[in-house]
Amino acid sequence: MTPPVLFISHGAPTLPIEPGETGAAWQVLGQQLERPKSILVISAHWTTNVPTVSTVERPQTIHDFSGFPEALYRLHYPALGAPQLAMEVMKSLQDAGIASQHDSTRGLDHGAWVPLMFLFPEADVPVTQLSLQAEADPTWHFNLGKAMRNLREQDVLIVASGSITHNLRALFAHPQGQAVPEWVSTFCDWMSARIAAGDIAALLNYRELAPYAAQNHPTDEHLLPLFVALGAATDIRQSTHLNQVLTYGILAMDAWRFD
């Protein structure tokens, strides 16, 4: 069976020690997935000028955050790397006319290892990461995903890890217990409706068309993984909308499975 494509809102780094509804939802999702041969993660926390794939054989767990409980820094995700998959990624991109490069030292950032700890807790599936290009637009990332669609036929699970909303300044200012602001719920509803309708054109032009787009995403990087997932999916209307949970009042934890 061809693996699905996943888009996951990975939330705060504290999720492994405060799993809540989101952790439970990801555990259920992991139990539903057939074990793939390997995993390719596209995380909002690795950006480069040129698409870059990790060829490291034993990726380190990168604790790319500060000021959190000490228990988080003791967590490790000891999966093997997937250098052969990395080479296949580069070939797929080359075939699509997209230049790429590899990095022989890059480990797994928290956008990768946090969700994988729930999806594949045994860390028994080789995994590698591909970087985003923060200065490139949604269409670029859609085409990046489309170029890698063929990898699914090789039993590769593509996991795009970002956030459906990501305004940290507003998050820190939002009083605990206050109702979800309209600018968050309206944006999430628009994104969900456009995905359900298969409206790729509108999604790629979300900055101009989606309500409160800039307020939810002052910068693009946490939404860019979604466009990679949309490109790698065969038909985005064949999707399951998962985990419609909001944390800290405005951080939406939505996820989609594209079959």
Image (cartoon, grey):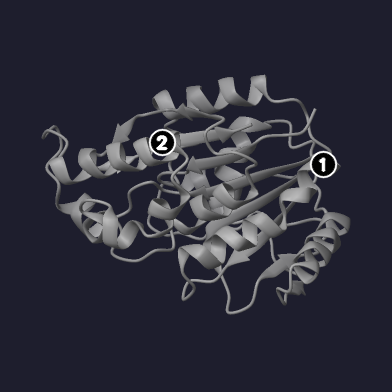
Give the residue number, with chain letter if any, for mark 2.
254
Give the residue number, with chain letter if any, for mark 1.
153
Instruction: Answer yes or no: is residue 74 visible.
Output: no
Sequence-first disc among 1 and 2: 1
| Percent position of residue 249, x then y | 21, 38
Quadrant of residue 60 within the rendered picture: bottom right
Left or right position of 21 against 150: left
Q: Tell me the amino acid under the disc marked 2.
A: Asp
Q: Return the residue nearer the eye: 206 or 75.
A: 206
Disc 2 residue crowd, few under 14, some 14–19, many 20+, Cα 10 Å:
many
Q: Is residue 70 above or below residue 18?
A: below
| Percent position of residue 218, x then y | 28, 64
Q: Residue drawn 83% across and 55% down?
A: 85
Q: Is residue 176 above or below residue 240?
A: below
Q: Return the residue nearer the eye: 91 or 21.
A: 91
Left or right position of 30 against 183: right
Q: Tell me the amino acid under the disc marked 1.
A: Glu
Q: Residue drawn 35% across and 36% down?
A: 193
CA gap, disc 1 and disc 2: 26 Å
The local secondary structure at tag 2 comes to: loop
The local secondary structure at tag 1 comes to: helix
Disc 1 residue crowd, few under 14, some 14–19, many 20+, Cα 10 Å:
few
CB atoms of marks 1 and 2 within 8 Å? no
Quadrant of residue 15 within the rendered picture: top left
| Marks 1, 2: nearer the viewer | 1
| Percent position of residue 36, x then y | 79, 35
Instruction: Answer yes or no: is residue 229 visible.
Output: yes
| Percent position of residue 21, x then y | 41, 24
Q: Return the residue nearer the eye: 216 or 109.
A: 216
